[in-house]
Amino acid sequence: MNERMVQLEVLRYDPQVDDEPHFQHYEVPCKEEWVVLDALNAIKESIDPTLNYRWSCHMAVCGSCGMMINGEPRLSCHAFLRGFAGVIRVEPLAHFPIERDLVTVADDFIDKLKRVKPYLIPGEPRPIGAGEYLQTPAQLMKYRHFSMCINCMLCYAACPQYALQPLFLGPAAITLAHRYNLDSRDGGREQRQQVIATDEGVWECSFVGACSEVCPKAVDPAAALQQVKVASTLDWFREHLLPGSAT
Amino acid sequence: MSRRPFVRLVSGTRWYFGHPRYLRYMSREVTCIFIGAFALLLLRAVERLSAGQAAYASFLAAIAGPWSALGLSLVVIFALHNAVSWFNVTPKALPVQIGEGFLPGGFIVAAHYAAWILVSLAVLLFAGVL
């Protein structure tokens, strides 16, 4: 199996020692089929055990290993080394505070995710004896692509609006709210609209579209946010032009 | 172990130089300046028209010349860029679901171009150009 030396520049930050982050250079013997995460694992196992980063599944499902790789938000388990030439620069996800090395503080995202209530809220109480909620394939397809989000936060690292306006709920949280709003089994849209149809919600989005470009699961958050804008605008017209009508 | 997260600041005035996709976005946004300027020019034209034939002729004479032609050409280019870039993203905002699938985005974009052409023809017809 072919092996070659790969050079990585990894951003390091130790809060107990460093005033600010700095790059550290590594030269790692790597196999042809490796991804950036494999190279980081090789560094940790054989060169520098103090390197910190998050990862879990190694198959683009858990969403833990998001990093800036040559300035682009990527899942490091999905970034093949053969796709890069020269030195590979690895940094923590942009727009999030750095906890240590490549580990970021995700508290803000988790808090925003909770606020949009990303779970089914039944419209009416229903006894268990009434059986399961039925859904047609067409009803499923309405939201299925938005349900593929793995909460990897790459969209936040790509979104300049989130960087400039930290109160912005951001692409993934609003997309998940939209996903449940589109679900025929859900009745919680009104509760979510109070959070997402606001200045800190969808109206902070200026449709840069970077979120959809970097999404590793083709969720297309930019589409979800524009659809929320259209739906919220229709709500406004219904409320002001058709008083008494339900939204 | 004490926590001391490091916050990386983003420049509010230079962030769009950070990636080509941000420059593409800004190129779309900046078109509004040219379209806004043309809207003001159009308002001035209407105001001069209401002031009489002589006033309007004087206005037309004032905006004639190579610099005006250059400025208006820029407005046309930026207006086209604005329209094309927005038309191309309309499938994201207005998906059309048909059964278990979605109408391909190309049809939605094409519908916008068709509507644009029809409206333009109607305006030219109304203005007596056609």
Image (tube, rainbow, N blue to C red):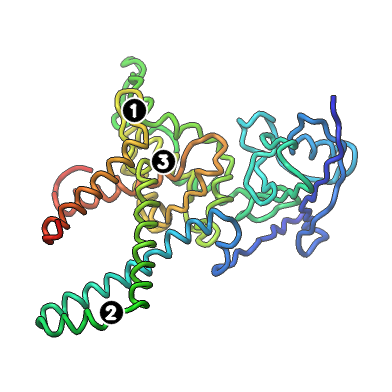
Labels 2, 1: one chain: no
Q: Give the residue displayed 59% in from the left and 56% down from the top.
A: B19
Q: Is residue A242 left or right of residue B117?
A: left
Q: Tell me which corner region of the image, top left, top right, bottom left or bottom right, holds residue B129.
A: bottom left
Residue A177 is labelled as 3
- Residue at mark 3 to residue at mark 1: CA–CA distance: 14 Å
Return the chain for callout 3.
Answer: A
Within 10 angstroms of label 1, few (less than 14), some, or many (20 or more) residues?
Answer: some
Does label 3 or label 1 sit earlier along the sequence? 3
Residue B63 is labelled as 2
Q: Amino acid at mark 1?
A: Arg
Secondary element type, mark 3: helix
- Residue at mark 2 to residue at mark 1: CA–CA distance: 61 Å
Foreground pick, A76 / A114: A76
Residue B107: x %, y % from top left: 32, 36
Foreground pick, B7 / A204: A204
Do tag 3 and tag 1 residues touch (Cβ < 8 Å)?
Answer: no
Residue B85: x %, y % from top left: 40, 52
Q: Give the residue displayed 39% in from the left and 40% down from the top.
A: A178
